[in-house]
Image: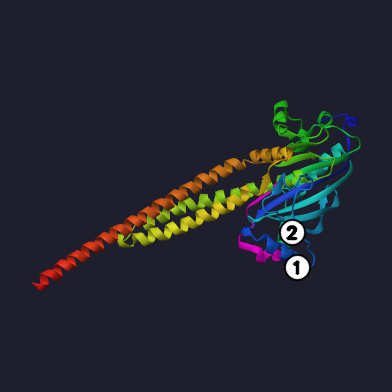
Amino acid sequence: MTVRPPSSEPLVRRGEVLALRLFDIAYSIDLGAAEALCAAHSSARSNRGRLSQAPEKAIAFGDPPVILPLEPVRLQIETRETTAAVTVRLYDFGAIAISLRFPVIDRPWPGFEAFVESAQAAVGPASTSAVWRQVLEQTLPIIQAALTRPSPATLQEDYLVATVFELDEPLSAVELKERIDLSLLLSGETRTLSAGEKRELLKQSYSYFDNDLVVLTWDRAFVYEPEGNSDVADVLEVANAQLLELRYYDELLDAELPRMYDQVEIARRGISSFAASRFAHLARSLYTLVAEVTELTEKVDNALQVTEDVYLARIYASALELFRVPKLGAAVDRKLAIVRDTYIALYEEASSSRGELLEVAIIVLIVIEILLGIARL
């Protein structure tokens, strides 16, 4: 176990643990209709999302998600019941993000670390808690009419953000990192990590002012934000939503490619005179698939538009890279290119088959004309 002088660690006056769970629930969501449906629901007052501190022209949502606050839930964290604020965000590309916010008040740093681990155990991916499904089942009936081609919410992503808003004494980012071993909080380990692993874990560290700090990892982040805004958490949520959707389309195309090859093989069998219609039908279905996936991936790519806020832009870009979103997007593009090339080849084969059929018809008509001419003699 790690032994640290108690006097070296600050007290967390005010903070929170944010647990995120995202689900893919539909091909797309009509956000205007969803907002109206939420407004009509007596217990749900919705609004459109925007970042709290960043200027609207500097960084903004492509199509702002609908934010739906729900009734708080009570969960067992450590040895007592804790109330968590519940918020739902709906994204136009078919994703829903559920966030649980657990407040932290007046805890020594080891107690803050312990609370983070207890929250992760209670609602993290390894937990058996039904709270995520309960919130999802509470939300879906409200917005059902706004969903285009609803899908089972089987694909999901999760993320945890530990935030400190106020310490018992003002500390700069440098002083905070000197006083606290953040690698323990970010890794969830109880034993001291190696120096190399610590460097790797803390590599994605960012500060704009001398008294703020963001450290990103694959499944957790630490945020020190004395100003109290939630922009970093919002940006991380969008990055996770993009990861979720690209995973969905990557899996969709993985399943579609073998099916496409089988359909092409079937289309080439049988009577050649019907090949043109078979090729044309298959080409149309592939064209529809390419159009739909391209439209939705463009929405995913444009979920957050960053122009002037350099700090949030760095965090956003780092999160995307850390989550391997660009690589996943490139994989989706490659598979789309295969489908697109197959569509072009099928279209050309259909045209060729029609040309051959037309040539046969012309020859038949010429033969008939010759035979009729001979019969008149």
Name the residue located 42 percent from the left edge and 61 percent from the top edge.
Answer: 281
**Residue lying at the far bottom of the rendered structure:** 376
Kind of residue sitting beneath label 2: Val
Judging depth in this view, the residue of 138 and 45 nearest the camera is: 45
Which badge, 1 or 2, is on the more N-terminal residue? 1
Gap between marks 1 and 2 measured at Cα: 18 Å
Q: Residue furthest top?
A: 195
Q: Position of residue 157 (x, y in %)?
A: 67, 49
How many numbered tags mark residues here?
Answer: 2
Decide: is 130 above or below 227. below
> Is 2 left, or right, of 263 in this rendering?
right
Q: Give the quarter of the image for residue 359.
A: bottom left
Q: Is 180 placed left or right of 62 in the picture? A: right
In the picture of the structure, the residue carrying the numbered disc 1 is 40
Residue 364, located in which quarter of the rendered image? Answer: bottom left
- Residue at image point 76% right, 37% down: 214
Badge 2 crowding class, 10 Å Cα cut-off, few under 14, some 14 to 19, many 20 or more, is some
Of tags 1 and 2, the one toward the viewer is 1
Q: How is the image coloured?
A: rainbow
Q: Secondary structure at mark 2?
A: helix
The answer to whether residue 69 is seen in the rendering is yes
In the image, which disc is placed on residue 135?
Answer: 2
Which part of the image, by quadrant, shows the N terminus? top right
Residue 97 rendering spot, x and y as whole percentages: 71, 53
Span shown in magenta: 140-158
Asked if the stretch drawn in magenta spans residue 149, the answer is yes
Q: Nearer the viewer, residue 147 or 102?
A: 147
Q: Quadrant of the C terminus?
A: bottom left
Q: Is residue 281 depicted above or below 100 in this figure?
A: below
